[in-house]
Image (cartoon, rainbow, N blue to C red):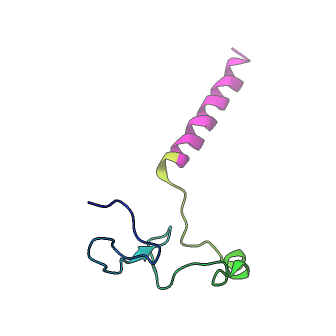
Amino acid sequence: MPTALTTTGCCPKCGALIAQFDVNGKIIDSRVTARSLDLKAIARADGEDEKAPWHFKLLVVSLVVYLAWRFVSLFI
């Protein structure tokens, strides 16, 4: 069983076109190349659909608790 696609985005075994997804899970209609990439549109993106992962939030909360404890321990 092959683990990669051909350069055209097709299955090397059966030749079927495989749907490609971006980071947010949306289907990419066309192949992204240097000519089709619009950097200005990416820079204008508002980012409303992007959320911080739960483990990052846990890390931030843990850091705040740790630093608060270190501050309190200065006076104990």
Highlighted magenta segment, given as a residue range: 56-76
Looking at the image, which is closer to me, 62 or 34? 34
Q: Which residue, as the protein is rendered here, is positioned at the far top?
A: 76
Rendered image quadrant of residue 69: top right
Main SS of residues in magenta: helix
List x then y, in percent, for residue 64.
Answer: 63, 37
Q: Is residue 74 above or below residue 46?
A: above
Q: Is residue 65 magenta?
A: yes
Q: Is residue 41 above or below residue 49?
A: below
Looking at the image, which is closer to me, 27 or 54? 27
Looking at the image, which is closer to me, 15 or 69? 15
List x then y, in percent, for residue 6.
Answer: 42, 71
* Quadrant in which the C terminus appears: top right
Which residue occupies 40% across, 68% down? 5
Which residue occupies 38% across, 78% down? 19
List x then y, in percent, for residue 41.
Answer: 68, 82
